Image (cartoon, rainbow, N blue to C red):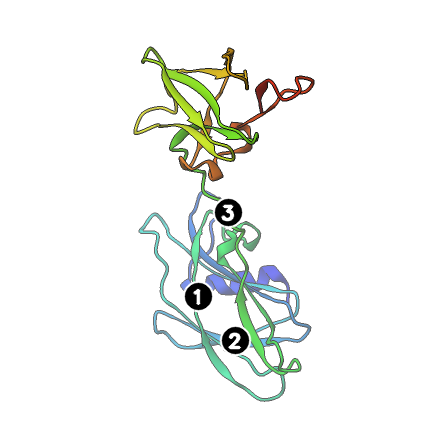
Amino acid sequence: MKRWTIIAAALALWAVLPSASFAQTHGCACLSNRVGVPINFQFSISGGPWQTRTLNPGIVYAFCNPYNGGPRTSPPLHFQLDRDAGPGTAWTDYTIQRVQSFSDQCAQVPPEGHYYVAFQANTNNQLLVIHRVKQPAAAPAAPQWQFGCACLNNMVGQPVNFRYRLGDQPWSSATLQAGNVYSFCTPYGAGPQSWLWLHFQFDRDMGPGTAWTDYTIARVASTTNQCVSVPRNGQYFVRFQPGTNNQFIHVTK
C-alpha cells in the first residue's frame, strides 16, 4: 500500500479532503512501522465506531484533521495496538497526541507529533510497543549574570597590601593573608550589567618600604559573588616577580 493512499484513508476519517495549500492548519500525529512485519491497530474518533488498519513495514500512517478556520483542537483519538507480533492478538491502549502542524504531510509535522512501532525489549520479538520520537534536548538556560567580579589570589607565603576605590569613592586599604582570596564583586541589581570603575594599587615591595603600583583589575560577569564560581578570566594571582630574589611581587592573570 502506498504512503499517499494511507494518508488519504486517515484524512477520510473526517470526510474532508485536505487542502492543497499549506496555509491550512492541521492537528496531526504520525505513526511509523519500524519492524519488519505488518502491524495491526484500530482507532475511534470522538467515540465513533472502531476502524481497523494494517500498517506495513516502513510505512507511515497520518492521523490529521483540518482546523478549517475554527479552534485549533482535534477530535479525541482513541487508539489500540495489537502488541502480539505472532498469530494472536493483544489489543493495548496507547495515547497518540496530535500536534499543530501547517501541513498534513508527515515529513512536515513537528517532531513531537511522531510515534513509531518497535519490538518490545526482552520479548524475543514477540511483542510490540509504541514509542514517541525523542525530542531534541532543550538548550541550556542562559546563565543569570548577577555580579561583576574579579578575584585576587595570594600565591606567596606572606601577607600582601593593596588599596582600591570604586569610581570617585575614597581609597580603601586591605591586607590579603597568605593563601587567601579577595573578592571585588558588585551586584548588577535590576539595572544593566555595568559597575563602578575599579582603581587598584598594589604594594610590590616585600621589604619594609612601599612601592605602590597601579594594576588593571577587570571584572567579569559572574552568576555568584563567590570566587570559586567566578570565570577564569576574572581571576588574578599575586606571585613573586622573577629575578628579584623574592623582594618584589606582581599581579598576573
Q: Residues within 10 Å of mark 2 (few under 14, many from 20)?
A: some
- In three-dimensional space, the C-alpha distance between marks 2 and 1, rounded to whole angstroms, equals 15 Å
Dot 2: element: strand
Dot 1: element: helix
Residue 253 vertical position relative to residue 111 in the rendered view, above or below? above
Hey, what amino acid is under mark 3?
Ala
Q: Position of residue 9 (x, y in %)?
A: 52, 65
Residue 113 vs residue 245, the one in the foreground: 245
Residue at 36% in and 74% down: 48
Query: Which tag is nearer the camera, tag 3 or tag 2?
Result: 2
Residue 70 vertical position relative to residue 33 in the rendered view, above or below? above
Q: Is 130 displayed left or right of 13 in the figure?
A: right
Q: Position of residue 229 (x, y in %)?
A: 47, 39
- Residue on which disc 2 sits: 41
Mark 1 and mark 2 in contact (Cβ < 8 Å)? no
- In three-dimensional space, the C-alpha distance between marks 3 and 2, rounded to whole angstroms, equals 28 Å
Query: Which tag is nearer the camera, tag 2 or tag 1?
Result: 2
Quadrant in which residue 73 is drawn = bottom left
Quadrant in which residue 252 is drawn = top right
- In primary-sequence order, the first of circles 2 and 1 is 1
Residue at 64% in and 63% down: 2
Hey, what amino acid is under mark 2?
Phe
Quarter occupied by the C terminus: top right
- Residue on which disc 3 sits: 20
Dot 3: element: loop
Query: Which numbered disc covers residue 13?
Result: 1
Q: Position of residue 54 (x, y in %)?
A: 58, 74
- In primary-sequence order, the first of circles 3 and 2 is 3
